[in-house]
Image (tube, rainbow, N blue to C red):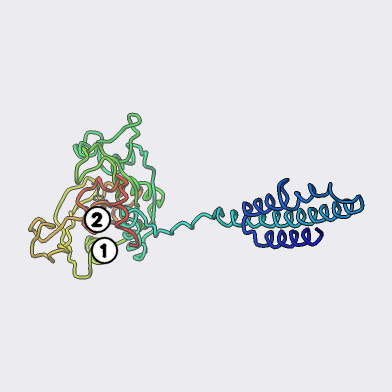
Amino acid sequence: MEKKIFDITQLGLAAIDQAQTLDQLTEVRNQYLAKKSELMSIFGLLKDLSVEEKKSIGLRINEARDQLTRALDTKKEWLEKQALQAKFAEEQLDITLPGRALELKTAHPFFLIQEEISDIFVAMGYQIAEGPEVESDHYNFELLNIPKDHPARDMQDSLYMDDVTLLRTHTSPVQARVMEAAKGQPVQVICPGKVYRRDEDDATHSHQFGQIEGLVIGEGVNLGHLKDTLLVFAKKLFGEKREIRLRPSFFPFTEPSVEIDVSCFVCSGKGCSMCKQTGWIEILGGGMVHPRVLTMNGYNDKTMTGFAFGIGIERVAMLRYGIDDIRKFYQNNLRFLKQFQGR
Ligand code: DAH
């Protein structure tokens, strides 16, 4: 009987060793330790034995059961640990966020051109001046030789805060502010900024747009200086082969006044849809600072002369980039804006 108990124990230990899963292990446990198992049924045979034998065989059975139980428990613990590790491995979460792709950002085309134009003039020695967008009638009109009843005011209606305060209609008032501050001394400035008008918005008009004003005052400044300055500007912006032409025009604050055209950069002057078959594209207005503007702003018009000009920022950007509608500058459409990436 002892031999039998020994054999069962060996078989049991081998089965425990081979069990691969917790289920298999439970089966082994049932097979070897359940009430009706081979080992436990030996208890039933004890009644036919002597007291001495009962004692020693009973002891053997208990030992065998304990040995198997310990082996089962150890294996169970190990299998459970394995199962947990497998589960961890399977359910592992990646809690790190993927990195964000770095997109190459760009300035708005309005500012790209504003900066490009500013750079051209700064390279020629100009300083940059700024003025308020909420401006007084005094600077916006009066000091620019546009008195109260002047018809030129009709073309520049704007939003008025009160009778004498308005959203500036052009950057020209910065001219007056700069002259006032210079106290009769020479100046050479550009003034970029936003301006406002009571305009119906369409493909070429907007109630808000940008301008760059230019002003140079000194002894002996003449129209030739204006022409050459703007020729340099046109070549830098539209290409070395560009020519410019001056046409007579009218502005209350300049005399003479000119409209400046650049030779068409698409057809080089032959005539195309860009230049409306004329070979020329109008880019800005300018002229010699009116003597009355000089004296009103503290200059001696006998010794000092000056030239001035005004550039529409969007207009130049539209020509430069081939943009067909000014409203695209303000709609924040990413498909439009992204086209300027990397410029
Ligand atoms: N202020 C003018 C406008 O808004 C543009 C302009 C024309 C500015 C001639 C100037 C200039 O300085 O000399 O229409």
* Residue 171, numbered circle: none
Q: Residue 289: percent from the left, percent from the top?
A: 26, 52
Disc 2 crowd rating (10 Å Cα; few below 14, some 14-19, many 20+) is many
Residue of label 2: 316
Q: Nearer the viewer, residue 180 or 36?
A: 36
**Which residue sits at x=68%, y=52%?**
31
* Residue 237, numbered circle: 1
Q: Quadrant of the N terminus?
A: bottom right
Q: Going by the image, does 340 lie left or right of 88?
A: left
Q: CA separation, marks 2 and 1?
A: 9 Å
Q: Nearer the viewer, residue 37 or 158?
A: 37
Does 170 appear above or below 222?
A: above
Say whether marks 2 and 1 touch (CB < 8 Å): yes
Q: Where is residue 302, by image quadrant? A: bottom left
Which residue sits furthest right?
Answer: 52
Q: Nearer the viewer, residue 130 or 340?
A: 340
Q: Going by the image, does 91 lie left or right of 229?
A: right
**Which residue sits at x=79%, y=62%?**
3
Q: Quadrant of the C terminus?
A: bottom left
Which residue sits furthest front?
Answer: 48
Does 306 appear above or below 251?
A: below
Q: Earlier in the sequence, mark 2 or mark 1?
A: 1
Q: Going by the image, does 167 lie left or right of 273?
A: right
Q: Nearer the viewer, residue 129 or 334?
A: 334
Amino acid at the residue labelled 2 = Val
For the question of whether residue 215 can be seen, the reply is no
Q: Secondary structure at mark 1?
A: helix
Q: Residue 239: percent from the left, percent from the top?
A: 23, 67
For the question of whether residue 229 can be seen, the reply is yes
**Which residue sits at x=70%, y=63%?**
14
Which residue sits furthest top?
Answer: 162
Amino acid at the residue labelled 1 = Leu
